[in-house]
Amino acid sequence: MMKQLNLNQKLGLTILLGLLAFSLLVAWLSPHSIDEQNLAQRLLLPSANNWLGTDHFGRDMMTRLASAIGLSFSLGVLCVVSASVLGVTLGVCSAWAGGRVEQALGVVVNILLALPGLVLVLLLSALAPGSFLVMYLAISLVQWVEYYRVTRAITRTIVDSPERQVSAMMGFGKWYQFKRHIWPAVAPSVFTMAAFGAANAILMMASLGFIAVGIQPPLAELGLMSVELFPFYIEAPWVLAQPLLVVALLVLGFHLLAGASRESLNSAD
């Protein structure tokens, strides 16, 4: 697999695997819990007992960062899987069926596109602050539209292609036609959108944490950690820098892994 990736994609995959390994190893080996407080040891510098220092409640930063990274990966993967499956399925059905099916789905997509994605996620998340399930559903609801538009545009071309029509005349079923003709054409764009989508999901969750409608304490989330630690940026700048750096690395890793520009995806429709 690594041989099929270019240098940027290899670097992105290395960053993401490194962060994931850090999250799993720390969660397994750390003697601390994410909500273990010790006010006598607040805002400590990195040491042998607390490798990344402690926060304003004396909680171990390494343990909390590991938990926050795991939460971000979980949300990103869940949103990508849900949005891509729904978007690709509806995109193929829309282009293949045409007519009223395509018109009805077009109305739904236009309604969703009329609302800024982050605003829609914010409104839905504000109904149940701190709910991971609601946040996941809201982000997936926003992201499936992009998969739908790109898949529909590509499928339209493939459905009318001589190769697909020959398969149909030879009696092959629609599932075979999808696997043989449509999916190979759609897959590269889907994987690219998935990488961008995971990065966007992580950024959306962090943004909700910034305005206190995302994951709530005592759970660790990168946006919430940044907000909580911001008042101490002069007293302990190394603590504030850690969640911000992790967010940047997560987004950078997924963007490098994508290996394609947003402009090339937008031109597909």
Image (cartoon, grey):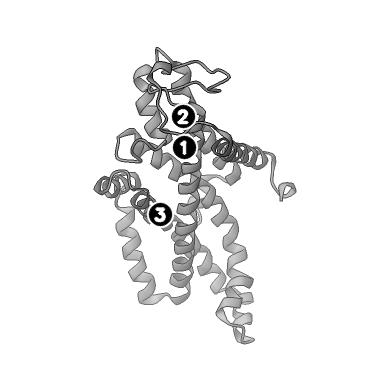
x 50%, y 44%: residue? 73
Tag 2 residue: 243
Name the quadrant containing residue 234: top left
x 39%, y 42%: residue? 204
Comparing labels 3 and 2, the label whose residue is closer to the camera: 2
As measured in the structure, the alpha-carbon distance from the residue carrying label 3 to the one carrying label 1 is 20 Å
Tag 3 residue: 140
Choose the circle earlier in sequence order: 3 or 2. Answer: 3
Question: x, y percentage for residue 48?
Answer: 58, 19
x 30%, y 44%: residue? 122
Q: Amino acid under label 3?
A: Ser
The reply to whether callout 2 and callout 1 are in contact (CB within 8 Å) is yes
Q: For the view shown, which residue lies furthest in the right direction?
A: 3
x 52%, y 29%: residue? 62
Label annotation for residue 12: none
As measured in the structure, the alpha-carbon distance from the residue carrying label 3 to the one carrying label 2 is 24 Å
Q: Judge whether residue 120 can be spotted in this image.
A: yes
Q: Amino acid under label 2?
A: Pro
Name the quadrant containing residue 86: bottom left
Q: Amino acid under label 1?
A: Ala
Label annotation for residue 68: 1
